[in-house]
Image: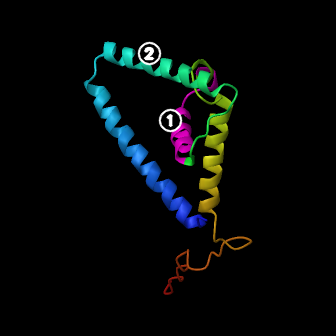
Amino acid sequence: MWSSSGMIAAVLVRFAYLAVSHAFAALWLLRMSDRDKDVEILALRHQLEVLRRRLGDQRPRLRPEDRVLLAALLAPLARVRLRQLRLLVSPDMVVRWHRDLMKRRHARASVNRGPGRPSAYGRFDPLPRPVSGN
């Protein structure tokens, strides 16, 4: 069985691989003409429809790194626009993934804090002493 830190490390490695491969794919897109991009989009849409037919009523199984990547890529889009896209998952699912991602990020940032207000000791400079000799 995987330990928690081992699983996180594996997800981070896979996510880094996906990020680098998508970065190179984006650089490759810069060289393509608009016509070539349109043809590729149509081919990808057709492949997506074939996958939907094969899956039927089953939900697709996405890995955590796939969810993170989809949530990060699609988060800037409005829900109305997300509903217009042909996605393997519903727009509400993408929004939930992004919300969960932000919740985990916030939870990690607030770990190891004790209860109550943080100590102010050592955060402020000492008060200046009054000048004598007036």
Nearer to the camera, 54 or 89: 54
The residue furthest bottom is 133
Q: Residue at x 42, y 50 (%)?
A: 16
Badge 2 marks a residue whose secondary structure is: helix
Distance from Cα at disc 2 to Cα at disc 1: 20 Å
User: Which element is circle 1 on?
Assistant: helix
Tag 2 near tag 1, CB within 8 Å: no
In the displayed structure, 74 sits above or below 2; it is: above
How many neighbours does mark 1 have within 10 angstroms: few (below 14), some (14-19), or many (20 or more)? few
Q: What residue is disc 1 on?
A: 73
- Residue flagged by tag 2: what amino acid is it? Leu
Instruction: Give the mark nearest the N terminus, 2 or 1.
Output: 2
The label number, if any, that marks residue 24 in the structure image: none
Relative image position of residue 92 (x, y in whole percent) = 68, 31
Q: Nearer the viewer, residue 7 or 111?
A: 7
As drawn, the label of residue 42 is 2
User: Magenta residues, as a range?
Assistant: 65-81
The residue sitting at the front extreme is: 54
